Image (cartoon, helix red, strand yellow):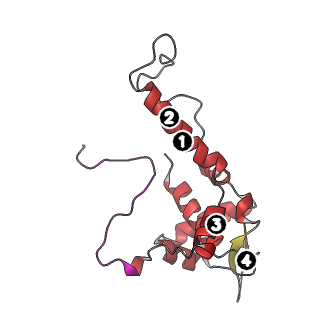
Amino acid sequence: MYGKATETAIAALSRLAEVFDGGKSRLSAQEIASDRDLQKPFVGKVLTTLSQAGLVSGSRGPGGGFSLAKPPSEIMIYDVFKLFEREEDGDLCPFGGGICGVGVNCALHEKLARVQDAVNHILHETTFEVFRKAYQDEGLRPTQPHEVQEHHDRETFRAPYKRKGFP
């Protein structure tokens, strides 16, 4: 559904949303990377892009770090998605070439349309407030990397590169 940069950006912004207090609390790229089990250099690069887009603000030096540039209720998941993903105008039809929808739809058309509708709903109607609320109001805490006894591949919603059991 989306790539590594988008996944990392959502993870970083979700962490900043969790601690949002009007911009007083700041987290370093290292803290965000550690809290989300991400690579620090890549988090730093993504935060730079998010800063240029006006979604985060950063400051250097003691007491520096990153915070959201505006309340999490004002940042849509789509605001992040559009920075890192190219929007496709085409459909998801396995036949391609504009065949689906001309005459009889393909056998997967309705299922794929429902998936796309669900994704669009999340992207366009969900703000980062869900992370602030879960963390601050409901006391929900994500499992930290050091709390996991054995290594498990974390679930990802990025587009699959290679699926288990398939060449």
* Badge 4 density bin: few <14, some 14–19, many ≥20, Cα 10 Å: some
Q: Nearer the viewer, residue 154 or 40?
A: 154
* Amino acid on which the number 2 mark rests in the picture: Arg
Q: Position of residue 124 (x, y in %)?
A: 65, 46
Callout 2 touching callout 1 (CB < 8 Å):
yes
Question: Which circle marks residue 114 in the picture?
Answer: 2
Q: Earlier in the sequence, mark 4 or mark 2?
A: 4
Task: Give the alpha-carbon distance from disc 2 to disc 1, as whole Å.
Answer: 6 Å
Give the mark, 4 or 1, whose residue is nearer the N terminus.
4
User: Circle 2 sits in a helix, a strand or a loop, which is it?
Assistant: helix
- Callout 1, which amino acid? Ala
In the foreground, 47 or 146: 146
Q: In terms of secondary structure, where does tag 1 sit? A: helix
Q: Residue at x 76, y 61 (%)?
A: 54
Mark 4 sits on what residue? 21
**Which residue position is annotated with label 3?**
47
Q: Residue at x 60, y 66 (%)?
A: 131
Question: Range of the magenta residues?
Answer: 147-165
User: Tag 3: residue type?
Assistant: Leu
